[in-house]
Image (cartoon, rainbow, N blue to C red):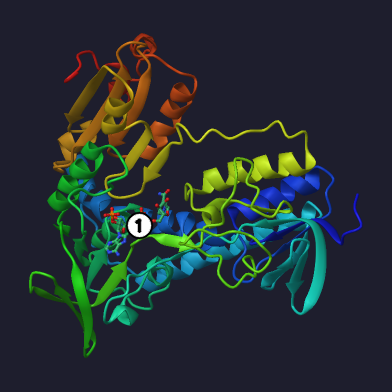
């Protein structure tokens, strides 16, 4: 196919890199992939998968309590953190093997080493120069901790997955996905948890109702949430850490975890020397086809810092493989990417927020309901669910579906199909609900609450 060693050389065996490599190989390309850290990347090793396992663990404490209202005697539950970490690591090891076997079975050459780009068609791996017709940068991202005195005492999600001992107290900093997920996990495991966020409303990239409703539910459960809160310094005091807040307050805690965003993991890869342009935050700049400023170099996933979600990286990977080795017809539409936050309770969302819809459409209708789920009628738990629809009045199209409540991610996935198909409110209304479920509320919302 070419005079190069490979048709495609992928740097990074995370979700995007593995998918692009397998797909390219299935289209007949000669492919190699280099991975310096762990097979499967962030999602498998320090993200989605271990986080969801921890989120399940965190929920059991409530499940035991809830069972009492259904006639169960409450078990004497004690929690074994090292066992959870070990079992999680076992599952990750299994998945590492699955990823490697998938690559090998597809005929992809796997190199367990760091790769560096030397020029538009050459990478260096373990001191060896390898030529490739195309290079794909899929190196993911890495947590960022702001530069404050004592930042070296803080952990990030990377370390939280491997703590030798579960702290008795934790301060979690941030108001995004990872902050609310880990605050929920720690609290669920019995850790005294303070969530410190600099803004007014958690999860600010979503519909504002989601963050404020989630914050209220988390507070009810006992998570302390401080808004407009800034840590100025962290100091070590024996075994403990002291966080100094801007108002003068000092909070002593066992651990401080920063969840203040993730930056593209692209430095030191030789990209700039090879002519590949990066943004100030390290994001590889790409066009609509994921091509960089160097024609033979493409980039996808967290390395381009568009949408930091595994399924999006997978979709980007498919577009690149198809463009380079297929018929090039595959495209990617970033609208209506559904997403879930595995906080307790969960958040699920797809489409436009109320604020985005008000900006883009002349006349919108909002349908909104809050209710106590049936289960909690007997459990006695004071947890409510929020559901919200944003509708364009002129076309009757449903623009956004938003939820805070149990299994929100599972529920919103189906509604994402409806939005992708352009469903109207009338079609939602014509859909027969499944009773008794929470999800049926989305097809029985009759009266708009505001216009
Ligand atoms: P997010 O971008 O979601 O949130 C970062 C948070 O940190 C924001 O609340 C931000 O505040 C705050 N922040 C940023 N800089 C500072 C600073 N200097 N000082 C104080 N606070 C600061 O990032 P995460 O780290 O939570 O997660 C990274 C990405 O990973 C997510 O955006 C998401 O795409 C992905 N992810 C997806 C998950 C899922 O699908 N369930 C789970 C976890 C992560 P402000 O709001 O004011 O900007």
The image shows residue 109, relative to residue 36, as above or below, that is above
The image shows residue 369, relative to residue 338, as above or below, that is above
Give the quarter of the image for residue 91: bottom right
Residue sitting at 36 percent across and 36 percent down? 349
Q: Is residue 401 left or right of residue 141?
A: left
Relative depth, front residue between 265 and 445: 265
- Residue at far bottom of view: 238
Q: Would you say the beta carbon of the disc 1 residue lies within 8 angstroms of ligand 1? A: yes
| The image quadrant in which ligand 1 is located | bottom left
Give the quarter of the image for residue 114: bottom right
Which quadrant: the C terminus?
top left
Q: Secondary structure at mark 1?
A: helix
Relative depth, front residue between 138 and 51: 138
Disc 1 marks which residue? 178
Q: Residues within 10 Å of mark 1 (few under 14, many from 20)?
A: many
Instruction: Give the image location of residue 318, x and y in percent.
Output: 66, 41
Residue sitting at 34 percent across and 52 percent down? 177
Residue sitting at 35 percent across and 27 percent down? 400
Instruction: Give the image location of residue 439, x and y in percent.
Output: 33, 27
Instruction: Give the image location of residue 305, x and y in percent.
Output: 49, 53
Q: Is residue 289 left or right of residue 2?
A: left
Relative depth, front residue between 15 and 5: 5
Mark count:
1
- Residue at far left of view: 248
Q: Is residue 164 left or right of residue 291?
A: left
Q: Is residue 150 visible?
A: yes
Q: Is residue 422 left or right of residue 216?
A: right
Q: Is residue 407 visible?
A: no
């Amino acid at each position: 196919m070419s005079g190069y060693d490979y048709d495609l050389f992928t740097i990074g065996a995370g979700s995007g890199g593995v998918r692009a490599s397998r797909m390219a190989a299935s289209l007949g390309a000669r492919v190699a992939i280099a991975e310096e850290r762990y097979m499967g990347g962030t999602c498998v090793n320090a993200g989605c998968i271990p986080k969801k396992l921890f989120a399940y663990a965190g929920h059991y404490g409530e499940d035991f309590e809830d069972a009492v209202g259904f006639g169960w005697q409450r078990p004497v539950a004690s929690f074994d953190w090292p066992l959870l970490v070990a079992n999680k690591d076992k599952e990750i090891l299994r998945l590492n093997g699955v990823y490697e076997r998938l690559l090998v079975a597809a005929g992809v050459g796997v190199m367990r080493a760091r790769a560096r780009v030397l020029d538009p068609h050459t990478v260096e791996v373990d001191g060896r120069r390898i030529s490739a017709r195309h290079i794909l940068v899929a190196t993911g991202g890495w947590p960022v901790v702001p530069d404050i005195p004592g930042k070296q005492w803080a952990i990030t999600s990377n370390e939280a997955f491997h703590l030798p001992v579960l702290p008795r107290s934790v301060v979690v900093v941030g108001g995004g996905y990872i902050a609310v997920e880990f605050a929920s996990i720690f609290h669920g495991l019995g850790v005294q948890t303070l969530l410190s966020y600099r803004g007014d409303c958690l999860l600010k990239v979503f519909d504002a109702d989601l963050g404020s409703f989630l914050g209220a539910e988390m507070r009810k459960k006992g998570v302390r949430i401080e808004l407009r809160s800034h840590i100025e310094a962290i100091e070590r005091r024996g075994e403990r850490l002291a966080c100094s807040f801007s108002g003068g307050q000092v909070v002593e805690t066992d651990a401080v975890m920063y969840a203040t965003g993730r930056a593209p993991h692209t430095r030191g890869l030789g990209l700039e020397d090879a002519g590949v342009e990066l943004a100030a935050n390290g994001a590889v700049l790409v066009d609509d086809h994921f091509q960089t400023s160097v024609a033979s170099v493409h980039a996808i996933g967290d390395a381009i810092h568009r949408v930091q979600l595994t399924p999006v990286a997978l979709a980007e990977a498919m577009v690149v493989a198809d463009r380079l080795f297929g018929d090039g017809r595959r495209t990617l539409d970033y609208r209506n990417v559904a997403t879930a936050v595995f906080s307790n309770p969960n958040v699920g969302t797809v489409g436009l927020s109320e604020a985005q819809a008000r900006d883009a459409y002349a006349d919108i209708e909002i349908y909104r309901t809050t209710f106590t789920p049936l289960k909690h009628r007997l459990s006695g738990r004071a947890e409510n669910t929020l559901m919200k629809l944003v509708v364009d009045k002129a076309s009757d199209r449903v623009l956004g579906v938003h939820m805070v409540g149990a299994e929100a991610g599972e529920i919103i996935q189906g509604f994402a199909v409806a939005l992708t198909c352009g469903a109207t409110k009338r079609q939602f209304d014509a859909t027969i609900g499944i009773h008794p479920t929470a999800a049926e509320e989305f097809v029985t919302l009759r009266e708009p609450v505001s216009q």
